[in-house]
Image (spheres, coloured by chain):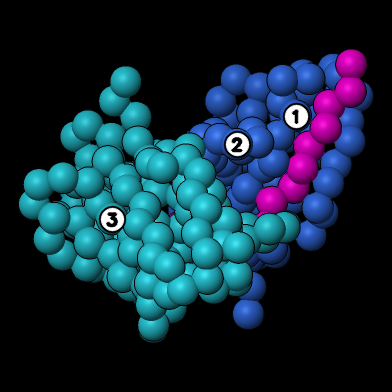
Amino acid sequence: NAGVMQNPRHLVRRRGQEARLRCSPMKGHSHVYWYRQLPEEGLKFMVYLQKENIIDESGMPKERFSAEFPKEGPSILRIQQVVRGDSAAYFCASSRGLAGLSGANVLTFGAGSRLTVL
Amino acid sequence: DQQVKQNSPSLSVQEGRISILNCDYTNSMFDYFLWYKKYPAEGPTFLISISSIKDKNEDGRFTVFLNKSAKHLSLHIVPSQPGDSAVYFCAAQEGYGGSQGNLIFGKGTKLSVKP
């Protein structure tokens, strides 16, 4: 299966703990996007990364949240000192990117990681 | 503030009839519009897209119409099937000079197709 893989699927943390969510992009894709879906809301863009580079983090909260996409291994979204308001589904998506693209930049999504903060 | 709006949270349709899902947007710089379908506990899956220079794109039972002057697009599903029951998200993408290709999503419309 060469789809976008996210883990863990479910994560429970207590307030103040750290949450780490991992994402392996689809084979052949070098661009990774993280989105967050709060209850009854749409998907909100958080960050866009290529290997070893953050391209756009305009949707990322300024504090406690960070993301990386190292040369080797999956992309990681890290939330420090979690609060109840961080409870959400976090979706990762990947694409080949825009370079040389003549059509829409279709993102392929993973199944998501559901974070619950107690 | 919301650049992509789906004003109907839900829609119920009889099997075999047409489903019409609507989407409005505010940013005239969007180059592409995409529709995604999402089942519970799964990630969104891509359905169909349309370029801002087109007014219609068709793929099997799915057709997307774009009215650029009204900043409105719609997804038509005909005939609707029970397996189409899902949440449908409208998404918009700015071009090369914009947001690097990331998508801006509406809140979604939950479609229920009744047998």
Name the amino acid type tagged 2. Answer: Ala
Mark count: 3
> Which residue is depicted at the point 31% across and 45% down?
A23
Q: Chain of mark 3?
A: A
**Does residue A39 appear to the left or right of A105 in the view shown?**
right
Callout 1: few (<14), some (14-19), or many (20+) C-alpha neighbours within 10 Å? Answer: some
**Does residue B64 appear to the left or right of A90 in the view shown?**
right
Q: Are marks 2 and 3 on the same chain?
A: no
What residue is pinned by disc 1? B85
- Residue A76 disc label: 3
Q: Chain of mark 1?
A: B
Could you tell me residue A108's position as x and y percent?
40, 39
Callout 3: few (<14), some (14-19), or many (20+) C-alpha neighbours within 10 Å? Answer: many
For numbered disc 3, what is the local secondary structure? Answer: strand
Depth check, mark 3 against mark 1: the one in front is 3
Q: Is residue B112 magenta?
A: yes
Q: Are marks 3 and 1 in contact (CB under 8 Å)?
A: no
Establish if B107 lies above or below A108: below
- Viewer-side residue, B62 vs A63: A63
- Residue B75 disc label: none
Establish if B3 lies above or below A95: below
The cyan one among the chains is A
What residue is pinned by disc 2? B41
The blue one among the chains is B
Could you tell me residue A103's position as x and y percent?
35, 44
Query: Within the image, what quadrant is residue A39 found in?
Result: bottom right
| Majority secondary structure of magenta residues | strand
Q: Is residue A88 magenta?
A: no
Could you tell me residue B101's position as x and y percent?
35, 58
> Which residue is depicted at the point 72% across and 20% down?
B83
